[in-house]
Amino acid sequence: MINILNLKKVYGSAVILDVPALTLEPNIYYIKGENGSGKSTFLKILAGLLPFEGTISFNNEIDLIKNPLAYRKLVNYGAAEPMYPHFLMGNDLIKFFEKTKKAPTFQANRLIERFNFQEFLNNPIGTYSSGTLKKLSLILAFIGSPKLLLLDEPLTTIDAETVSALYTLINEYYTKDMVLILSSHHRFTDKLIINGTLEVGNHTISLK
Amino acid sequence: MNIIIKIINRVFVLEYYKANLFFFLMILSLLTGFGTFPKPILLHSEIMLDISKHAYLLMITLFLFTLYNFKCYHFIIKQFTATQNNFLMSLIHLPKKRLFSYLLYIQIVLLLPFLIYLFITASIAFINAHFLSGIFTLIYSLLLASATAFCYGYRVWMHTNKEYTVIPLAWTRRIKKAPFLFYVLFVLQEQEVCLVITKICSGIVLVGVINAGDAPDIKFIAFGILTSIFIHTTLIFRVKSFEDQFMDFLRILPLPTYNRIASLLLAYSFILIPEILVIFFNFIQSPETFAAILFVIPLALSTILFFHSILYTLNVDINNYITYSFCIYLLITLIVLFGIHPLILGFVFFFISYFLFHRYYYAYETKSNLIKRQ
């Protein structure tokens, strides 16, 4: 499904990640590692946000470098610390993502309801609390029909109710032909069935 | 000393003068570098007398004072809204008059070097019976300082209440926003001071071009518009920094390169509307200059796009960026003056910008990201 070959991420002379080969079959993966081990960097690379050396592709066909547009159609990403323009409204971004990701009808509305976001829709993002901002980033991450969903620290700053809604949503949203990678310093409850663990350490990633 | 004054002095006054030490040394050496004592004093008293005698000199002086005031305003707002200075927001709980007096104090201390010069100028005007000039100088400088202090109060209050927007919220909510409007709104909502200063300077250059004669040469119009674009470099740098910091979400979305570059082009076209209108309405009359407009406007748009695109290849701070941009500006101006047609140059810059954008948009990594990791 996701094929990673000779992935290397270097900052100056420091090697952050060096992954000779890794294949991720459709599953829900938990990515774990110490602070600064490169988890977020790996997720950002998979999302197409950071330059890297090597190859990342869907089924060895849709390459991130060679087919950036086709690849990005298949990937959604929720940042650990989302940042959006302060002066925009949450609704502006949701509408924009809906259009760009060609989301199914009413999908965004359902997500808004699920995360109890209605009252914040028409407020400027600059007025959001960190929890509300995280909710917005989760809504945006679920818009569309991705084959690779990356959620970096999805449990941070959100309340218990939203955590529960997120678990339910992941279980409903997850389909048999997609890869879902979650990173978190919090423990996931048994409500979420994690099928694989990606361990980040010694500048590489191994599948357990 | 009052504790609030102490804090104000440390957070605003000391920081301001420390940050601008080089600027003040340069101004001081310019003002006193005309010979040995008492020559500089005599020279300045003559200049001050001329300022009080001639209205146009007075206007230029007060215009420079206004620009300096903008510089102070920008610094103070930046300090007020910096995360480490969040505690200053508690000032909002002071009685309004007291808060205003503190804000006025900040403004007066920051304006002090210029105010002293203006007050001496006004005194010389009074001594030489130019009462109108003296009164105008005094009233203008005091009114500007007070109005700016009032603006600080308003901004601080709005920031605390999280409602501050240049464009009313009700309007912003109604606008259906395409990506190019994200950039435009950023400039209008968060870079209003930079925008005003840029437009004033750009306007001065264009006024010079307009008044150069009945039908100025196309090269001269191109030179004017290129200078005007170069004046926008600070704004371009800030737009790019905004893109790096807050528009990361655009990089994840499946948008083709032409779509992204079109958004930027539209945003800059919007920002350049005043310049385009000034050129358009002043040169539409004669057929030769009207043709010049058609050639020069694409050059302006492609040059501003080029100045933005090079930031994907250069990981530089604003000082280096302005230096690079200045060299590029000189080079483009020389090319135009040596006879390459502005329209051809416009197309060349557009294609270079497209190439840089296409090649480096995803290969680029922000400097802060690299530093954080290293």
Image (cartoon, coloured by chain):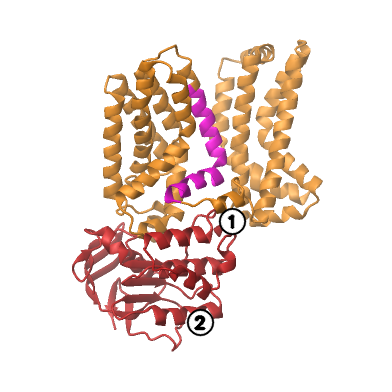
Chain colours: A red, B orange
From what the image shows, is residue B311 above or below residue A179?
A: above
Instruction: Give the magenta part as a residue range.
Output: B178-206
The residue type indicated by label 1 comes to: Thr
| Front tag of 1 and 2 | 2
Q: Secondary structure at mark 2?
A: helix
Indicate left or right for A195 with B52 as reference.
Answer: left
Along the viewing direction, whichever of B322 and A65 lies nearer the viewer: A65
Q: Secondary structure at mark 1?
A: helix
The residue where tag 2 is placed is A164
For the point 30% across and 37% down, the residue is B350
Disc 1 with disc 2 on a shared chain: no
Q: Residues within 10 Å of mark 2 (few under 14, many from 20)?
A: some
Q: Is residue B316 visible?
A: no
Q: Is residue B251 visible?
A: yes
The answer to whether residue A115 is magenta is: no
Indicate the quadrant containing the C terminus of chain B: top left, top right, bottom left or bottom right: bottom left
The residue type indicated by label 2 comes to: Ser
The chain identifier of the residue carrying mark 2 reads A
Indicate left or right for B54 with B126 as reference.
Answer: left
The residue where tag 1 is placed is B83
Along the viewing direction, whichever of B215 and B361 lies nearer the viewer: B215
Q: Residues within 10 Å of mark 1 (few under 14, many from 20)?
A: few
Q: Give residue B202's position: percent from left, percent from top.
A: 49, 28
Furthest residue toward front: A105
Quarter of the view holding residue A56 = bottom left
* Secondary structure mostly seen in the magenta stretch: helix
Q: Give residue A187's position: percent from left, percent from top.
A: 45, 83
For marks 1 and 2, give the CA distance. Answer: 33 Å
Indicate left or right for B11 with A175 as reference.
Answer: right
Q: Give residue A15's position: percent from left, percent from top.
A: 29, 64
From what the image shows, is residue B164 above or below residue A91?
A: above
Quarter of the view holding residue B249 = bottom left
